Amino acid sequence: MDVPEMAPYARHIFICSGPFCDPEGKGSRLYAQLAHKLGALGEYDNPQRVKRGTSPCLGVCHSGPIVVVYPDGIWYCQVNEALLDRIIEEHLGNGQPVEEAVYHRLEDRTYSSDVR
């Protein structure tokens, strides 16, 4: 099987573009700016690279645009351009989530291969 190669990356940012949480399409506009805004963090050969993605639904359907950063499991809502800039600089660039804008954190869980 011919499989693609993938360069290392540190984080993955998703922006919801779904019509229920973001009926005005703000998330799509933020996503369109994301490659430029990430700068060096978005470069393919940067081991601290941040992959980016958009999703038609992140399952929240309220208070969008919704942005989630993995593997951190940090969720932001009502993201505008100014907050996105802070997320890029503070969270993605310096490893410090924008605490006052975080509305959900994925719980730290230990997963077991034992399925009962």
Image: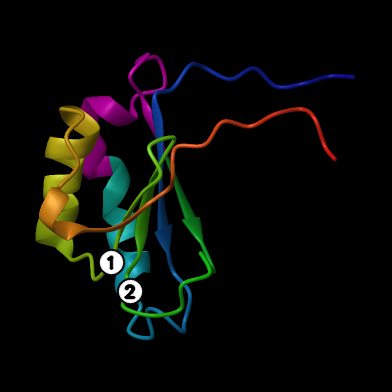
Identify whether 36 is placed above or below 102: above
On the image, the x and y values in percent for residue 73 come to: 40, 44
Q: Nearer the viewer, residue 112 or 41?
A: 112
- Which kind of residue does numbered mark 2 sit on? Gly
Q: Nearer the viewer, residue 90 or 42?
A: 90
Return the disc, 2 or 1, that comes first in the chain's sequence: 2
Residue tagged 2: 64
- Circle 2 packing at 10 Å, graded few (<14), some (14-19), many (20+), is many
Q: At 20% across and 37% down in the image, what residue appears?
A: 91
Residue tagged 1: 77
Q: At 21% across and 29% down in the image, what residue appears?
A: 95
Quadrant including the C terminus: top right
Instruction: Judge left or right: residue 20 versus residue 78.
Output: right
Residue positioned most to the front: 116
Q: At 24% across and 37% down in the image, what residue appears?
A: 38
Q: How many marks do you count on the picture?
A: 2
Quadrant including the N terminus: top right
Q: What is the span of residues highlighted in magenta in the rendered image?
A: 36-51
- Which kind of residue does numbered mark 1 sit on? Cys
What secondary structure is found at the residue carrying circle 1? loop
Q: Tell whether label 1 touches label 2 (CB within 8 Å).
A: yes
What secondary structure is found at the residue carrying circle 2? loop
Residue 48 among magenta residues: yes
Q: How is the image coloured?
A: rainbow
Residue 32 among magenta residues: no
Residue 21: image quadrant is: bottom left
